[in-house]
Amino acid sequence: MAHAPATPLAAPHGRGKRLAISLAVAALIILLDQVTKIYFNTQFRYGERLNLLPFFDFTLLYNRGAAFSFLASEEGWQRWLFTVLGVGASAVIIWLIARTPGQPRFRAALTLIMGGAIGNVIDRLLHGHVVDFLLFYWKDWYYPAFNIADVAIVCGAALLVIDEILRSREKARQARASN
């Protein structure tokens, strides 16, 4: 039996599969993020710390702002701003993932960012703040507390940078080879 030639209709199937995989991975990130936040929100009192290493504690803190508590002291409008930004970024990411065949690193980076963004949006909608519980420090220096969603966002951003560097190197190599 002969196979039918490829048609333009074949492309959406691959796009749909890529998007479904990305959405499933993002959902796993969101699930892990929310389960850990529920645990710390129910098992710790606000500000409580459990020392695990000389430089790391579990804690329970709330952040009404963005990264590094940016705008945390505002009157509450920032909750909606960061919610809209998270939802908007996720919509753009879904669009980009569906339209980037042959770029698995790029899609993986966007998937991590989307999962983290939605995890923090859920907190803002449910609580009016983001639940943070991972605290790194050294002596009197403290890195702002963060959560699994934040880890996913930072890893996604790092992967975006790595992807761009590697793609730029590949383009330069191809340009040299064609000369």
Image (spheres, helix red, strand yellow):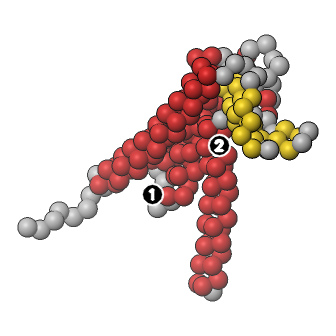
Marks 1/2 in contact by CB < 8 Å: the verdict is no
Left or right side of 24 for 171: right
Tell me where residue 135 appears, x and y as whole percent.
75, 37
Marks 1 and 2, how far apart in space?
26 Å
Left or right side of 157 for 25: left
Q: Nearer the viewer, residue 148 or 93?
A: 148
**Alpha-carbon neighbours of circle 1 within 10 Å: few (<14), some, or many (≥20)?**
some
* Figure disc tally: 2
Q: Where's the N terminus, which quadrant?
A: bottom left
Q: Is residue 144 visible?
A: yes
Q: Residue at image x 16%, y 65%?
A: 3
Left or right side of 51 for 172: left
**Alpha-carbon neighbours of circle 2 within 10 Å: few (<14), some, or many (≥20)?**
some
Which of the labelled discs sits on residue 125, or is there none?
none
Helix, strand or loop at mark 2: helix
Residue beneath disc 1? 101
Q: Nearer the viewer, residue 87 or 57?
A: 57
Q: Earlier in the sequence, mark 1 or mark 2?
A: 1
Say what amino acid the circle numbered 1 marks.
Pro
Tell me where residue 34 appears, x and y as whole percent.
54, 29
Q: Residue at image x 49%, y 33%?
A: 31
Q: Quadrant of residue 177?
A: bottom right
Helix, strand or loop at mark 1: loop
Tell me where residue 8 appears, x and y as whole percent.
31, 55
Q: Nearer the viewer, residue 153 or 4?
A: 153
Residue beneath disc 2? 151
Q: Residue at image x 61%, y 22%?
A: 43
Say what amino acid the circle numbered 2 marks.
Val
Q: Residue at image x 86%, y 44%?
A: 138
